[in-house]
Structures are given as structure tokens and as C-alpha cells.
Image (tube, rainbow, N blue to C red):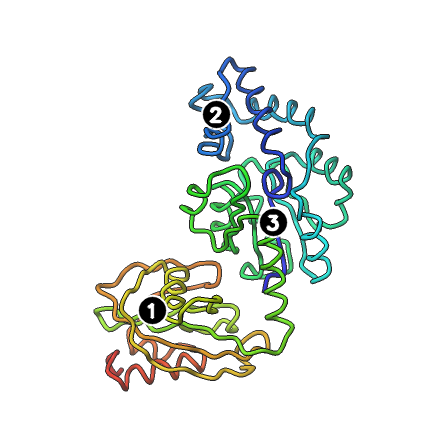
Amino acid sequence: MIRHLILDWAGTLADDRALTLAATNDTLAHFGAPPVDEDTYRREFTLPVERFYHRFIGDLPRETIDAVFFRRFAARMARAELFADVPALLHLCRLRGVALSICSSVPTEILDTLLEQLGLRGFFRHIGGGAADKIPVLRQIVAQAPFRPDETLYVGDTPHDLEAAHAAEVIAGAALYGYATEERLQALRPDHAFAEVRDLIDLIDREHLLASERRVIATVGGLLVASSGEMLLIRTAKWSGLWGLPGGKIHYGETMLDAYRREISEETGIRVEHADWLCVQDCIESPEFLEPRHFLLINYVSRVSGRPQPRKNYESTDIGWYSPAQVASMDLNQPTRAAVTLAAQLGYVPVS
């Protein structure tokens, strides 16, 4: 469940792309460079800002660029407007008990002025402004908050925002309606992509519904077996630090097999095509799971050519390939132990 929502400001909460582009062109003009059009800005703008400005004005220090840019930006900030559904999002988070923070390259003093001007200051527990490089700032916000990384969603509208979310090992959300193009953002593998603020509102509401209503949740996942006979396992905080199988919830309108392939790709970085049915398990308020839930665990098994290098996402603290002998002595959650035992009985993995 999302308990902490961290938001970028410009292009995510504030509909200020035109103002920022104007301040950018003022800055370029200050250093003797021609202006850029909006398409170029959306294709190329990135943080830290010197990476964007380099090809136009050469190797100037970030501080020199920022001094000019934010002076021009501050002159326009009184015209900054929020995206239409932002007030609804903030009020919903307050109602649902979701903590809110900001991580932005906009200096804190400018953010404070804007938040006071818009009547929003009381919504946010932490304001991380002046984040020229958002990676250390986001990590600090996450470390100081009383929420696990897998309960934390950071939403931003530039590739650097997604890089920061991945580096902080939190849920990465892409605001497709902001500064950067959808193509650039999707290339960074966001965990969620929002075409509009309303999509983020819908996600918060769905998460709250799953957490608050007593309903059965269908999930899909499975056992990946390498050519060596090793099995891919992940360790997650939501299973009390025990080892388990990659997997997750089935989306509405998604087949079980499509959901399996998507979840395996998202959680391990490995793409699977072939899958054999393994089993379905009831998991009703397991004491091993951190929160009371009733899951239907639908499991497949896939043989994987070679031993591809997995990558973990925000849900896992460890991931790796393990031999049957190693797996036999690992702290597995009970459903995973049952699935591995069945897979061995069916001949998918060697008996340890």
C-alpha cells in the first residue's frame, strides 16, 4: 500500500511548462544562445541542468546557470497554476492518511512562497527544494520518513525523476503530462505511468480499497528455473523478510498468463515466453504477510535458458539464483515452500 507520496513540483503539480520554458530561453539569451522551442525542450531537458545547457552555452557551473534561471523563474512564479485535479489529489491523500512530501529542483524559498500563495503549505510533511541532483535529496527524504521504500511512491515528469526513484529504491511514477515526452519516460521503466493527475488519484483510491475492504485478491507469479537447475528467489519486506517467488496482482482485463509475464519482467528484468501451470494456493491472512490479506496465489513455472542476470525492483531487498540445496535451507514463506516442493515432484527442478 502507498503510505508516502513524494511529488515533484514543476510539471507534476504545477502546470508551468510554458513559464519554465520562457525562463529557460531568458537564461539562454543571457549567455548569448538562441532560444529553444517547446518540442526541443520536451525531448532534451534533463537534470542536473548543466547536462541540458551544455550544448547551448558550454561548460558553465550549475550555480551560475541557476542564479540566472531562478531569478527569471521567480519573476514569473505568481502566474504559476496547479493542474486541475491537484487539489483533489492532495485532499484525497489527507483523507486516506497518505503522507505527502515534495522533492524539487525549485529552491525551497520559492516553493514556500508558492505553497503559501496557493494555500497548500499544510499538506506537506517535508519540502525538499533546491534538489539540483534529486538522487541524494530523495534518498534523504525516504530515509527520514517512517515508511518503507516499497510503501513510497515518487512521481515526477523528467527522466532524472525516474532515475532518482530507482536509485532510492522506491516506486517510480512517471507524470506523462509534464515536461518530458512519454517516449523518454517510458524508456526508464516506471512502475506506474500517469497520463493525467486523475490517474494518480485512481491509483491511491485502488490501493486504499485493497487495504481497507475484505476482498479476495488474485495474484500471479511463479518459479523461474535456470539451465543449471537453480531457482530465482526474491526477499521482500512485505513477506516479513522471507524469501519468495516474484509476482503480483492481476490487472483488470489482463489474462493470468499476460499478468505473469508482466510481473516477472517488472520484478526481475527477465522476459519469459513459455510457462507451465503449476498450482493455485489459498493464502488467507497469512501471519507471514505484513498485513491481513486474502490472496489467491496463481503459480506458473518457466525454464529459462542460461542464467540471466536479474535486477531487483522496489519490492525486493535481495534477488538471486539458488541451487536446490541452498533453497532447502533458506527462510522461504510457506506458499513458496509448497510451490518449490511441487515443482520438484513434477521434475522441474532437481531434488536436493
* In the image, farthest residue toward the front: 253
How far is disc 1 from disc 3 in space, using C-alphas?
36 Å
From the image, tell me which residue sits under label 3: 197
Amino acid beneath label 3: Val
Quadrant in the rendering for residue 261: bottom left
Amino acid beneath label 1: Leu
Between discs 1 and 2, the one toward the N terminus: 2
Question: Is 291 situated above or below 74?
Answer: below
Where's residue 287, x and y in %? Answer: 55, 81
How far is disc 3 from disc 2 in space, using C-alphas?
29 Å
- Label 1: state its secondary structure: strand
Please rate how many residues cluster around mark 2, counting C-alpha atoms within 10 Å: few if below 14, some from 14 to 19, many from 20.
many
Q: Residue at x 56, y 27 (%)?
A: 21
From the image, tell me which residue sits under label 1: 232
From the image, tell me which residue sits under label 2: 53
- Label 2: state its secondary structure: helix
Left/right placement of residue 3 relative to residue 284 reads right
Between discs 1 and 3, the one toward the N terminus: 3
Question: Is 270 situated above or below 294?
Answer: above
Pick the residue in front: 134 or 300. 300
Q: Residue at x 47, y 66 (%)?
A: 251
Residues at discs 3 and 2 in contact (Cβ within 8 Å): no
